[in-house]
């Protein structure tokens, strides 16, 4: 009887041991399958765009004179007279003082003087101007009408008007959300093709903001901001990873 119990205990130990091995195999398989499931991700890039109109304009210009060291005093006197004419031009065109900035005179050596080493050193006297306003029509008219200053003898040079959209920060937040929704819709289409469903969002990384001229594809890895047009297309991309089940 004792031997039978021992024998029974031995077989029982064998069966129990075998059961543990089988259980370990089953549990191990379940763990690996869950791991494989957890590792299944779908990487998709979503895009969102919105058309906006610029609400702020910036216009840079300058006026200048040339002078030698012997007539530098006269050069500064001419600049003072030019500044008066320039200030009157902006006042006549209804540019408010808070919209206009005229910098003090800057003096630079003119290295493009003649090859004659005996010629006196020439200096460029320059004052830069910045107009920033929300009245886009006004600044556009200014950029087209400064010929009157040139007619008065002012050596006036202007750059193209730059147009900006002030609500870009808030718009970016909205577009990131829209881009994630777009990415999920794309991911679902891909998953459905493989008889799968999209699960939870694993990660998301927003790309740089692209502010483009309408219908432009001139994007940059570092972001781009087109300032030439009033109408702008703002685009944001988001790289996402989705679980798949």
Image: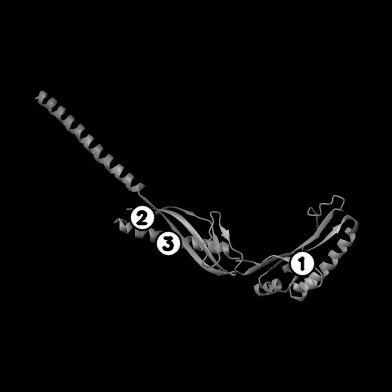
In this orientation, which residue lies closer to the viewer: 43 or 38? 43
* Residue ID at (17%, 33%): 15
Q: Secondary structure at mark 3?
A: helix
Task: Tell me the residue that label 2 is attached to.
Answer: 199
126 horizontally vs 219: left or right: right
* Residue ID at (24%, 40%): 26
Q: Foreground mark, 2 or 1?
A: 1
Q: Secondary structure at mark 2?
A: strand
Q: Is 96 drawn above or below residue 187 in the view shown?
A: below
- Residue 201: image location, x then y, percent: 41, 54
Checking the image for residue 182, the label placed there is 3
- Residue 86: image location, x then y, percent: 79, 69
Task: Tell me the residue that label 1 is attached to.
Answer: 156
In this orientation, which residue lies closer to the viewer: 33 or 128? 128
Q: Is 110 drawn above or below residue 159 in the view shown?
A: above
Q: Foreground mark, 1 or 3?
A: 1
* Residue ID at (72%, 74%): 145
56 horizontally vs 234: left or right: right
In terms of image quadrants, where is residue 107?
bottom right
Q: Foreground mark, 3 or 2?
A: 3
């Amino acid at each position: 009887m004792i031997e039978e119990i021992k024998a029974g205990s031995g077989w029982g130990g064998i069966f129990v041991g075998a059961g543990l091995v089988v259980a370990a195999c089953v549990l191990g398989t379940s763990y690996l399958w869950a791991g494989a499931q957890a590792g299944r991700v779908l990487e998709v890039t979503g895009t969102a765009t919105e058309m906006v109109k610029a609400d702020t304009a910036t216009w840079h210009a300058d006026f200048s004179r040339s002078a030698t060291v012997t007539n530098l005093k006269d050069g500064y006197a001419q600049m003072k007279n030019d500044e008066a004419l320039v200030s009157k031009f902006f006042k006549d065109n209804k540019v408010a003082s808070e919209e206009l900035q005229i910098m003090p005179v800057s003096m630079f050596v003119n290295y493009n003087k003649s090859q004659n080493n005996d010629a006196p050193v020439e200096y460029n006297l320059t004052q830069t101007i910045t107009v920033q306003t929300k009245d886009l029509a006004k600044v556009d008219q200014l950029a087209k009408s400064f010929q009157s200053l040139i007619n008065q003898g002012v050596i006036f040079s202007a750059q193209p008007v730059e147009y900006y959209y002030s609500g870009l920060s808030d718009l970016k937040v909205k577009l990131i959300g829209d881009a994630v929704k777009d990415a999920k819709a794309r991911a679902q289409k891909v998953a459905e093709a493989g008889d799968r469903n999209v699960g939870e969002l694993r990660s998301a990384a927003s790309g740089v903001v692209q502010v483009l001229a309408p219908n432009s594809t001139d994007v940059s890895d570092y972001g781009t901001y087109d300032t030439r047009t009033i109408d702008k297309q703002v685009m944001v991309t988001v790289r996402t990873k989705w679980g798949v089940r």
